[in-house]
Image (cartoon, helix red, strand yellow):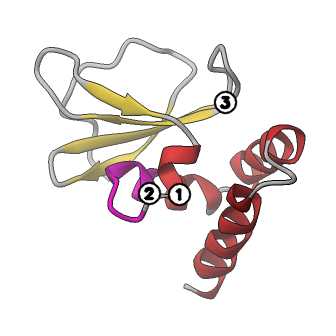
Amino acid sequence: MTGPIHEHDCDECKYLGTVNQNDLYFCPNDLGGPTVICRYGKAGDYRSGLVFGLDKDSPLHEALKRALKVMEYRRIILKHFDKYERETTRWCALLNLIAEVDLG
């Protein structure tokens, strides 16, 4: 895997790769909880948010899929969703995405 193409300013973020000029990251310690990040612009443009990673049309979807493949990150994401999204359709969407990732 080559390195990121856009500057990123968080030392805690874990680089997940670059897809279509989008650098993808997982951050276990964002202020609001863990998150996935898509950095795409020369001016530091980015999108972030675990729940936005559930949208299959978002570049964050690929970031979330890649993060879920790493068991350490998966545990962090599940703990966060269990606490804040347990009774929502987002919880079901996350579990479906995990199944998709596991089935390859």
1 or 3: tag closer to the N-terminus: 3
Query: What is the three-letter code of the residue carrying label 1?
Result: Leu
2 or 3: tag closer to the N-terminus: 3
Name the residue furthest bottom.
Answer: 103
Which region of the structure is painted magenta? 56-63
SS at circle 1: helix
Residue 56: image location, x then y, percent: 40, 65
**Circle 2 residues within 10 Å: few <14, some 14–19, many ≥20:** many
Query: What is the three-letter code of the residue carrying label 3?
Result: Pro
Is there CB contact under 8 Å for labels 2 and 3? no
> Which circle marks residue 7 in the picture?
none
In front of the other: 18 or 53: 53
Is there CB contact under 8 Å for labels 1 and 2? yes
Q: Residue at x 49, y 51 (%)?
A: 53
Is there CB contact under 8 Å for labels 1 and 3? no
**Vertically, is 58 above or below 25?**
below
In front of the other: 79 or 9: 79
Q: Disc 2 vs disc 3: which is toward the camera?
A: 2
Q: Residue at x 58, y 42 (%)?
A: 50
Residue 92 relative to residue 68: left or right: right
> Which circle marks residue 54 in the picture?
1
Please state, as top left, top right, bottom left or bottom right, where the C terminus lies in the image.
bottom right
Q: Residue at x 20, y 34 (%)?
A: 40
Q: Residue at x 22, y 22 (%)?
A: 45
Which residue, given by chain and number where applicable, does mark 3 sit on? 28
Asked where in the image residue 34 lies, by quadrant, the reply is top right
Which residue, given by chain and number where applicable, does mark 2 sit on? 61
In front of the other: 52 or 45: 52
**Circle 1 residues within 10 Å: few <14, some 14–19, many ≥20:** many
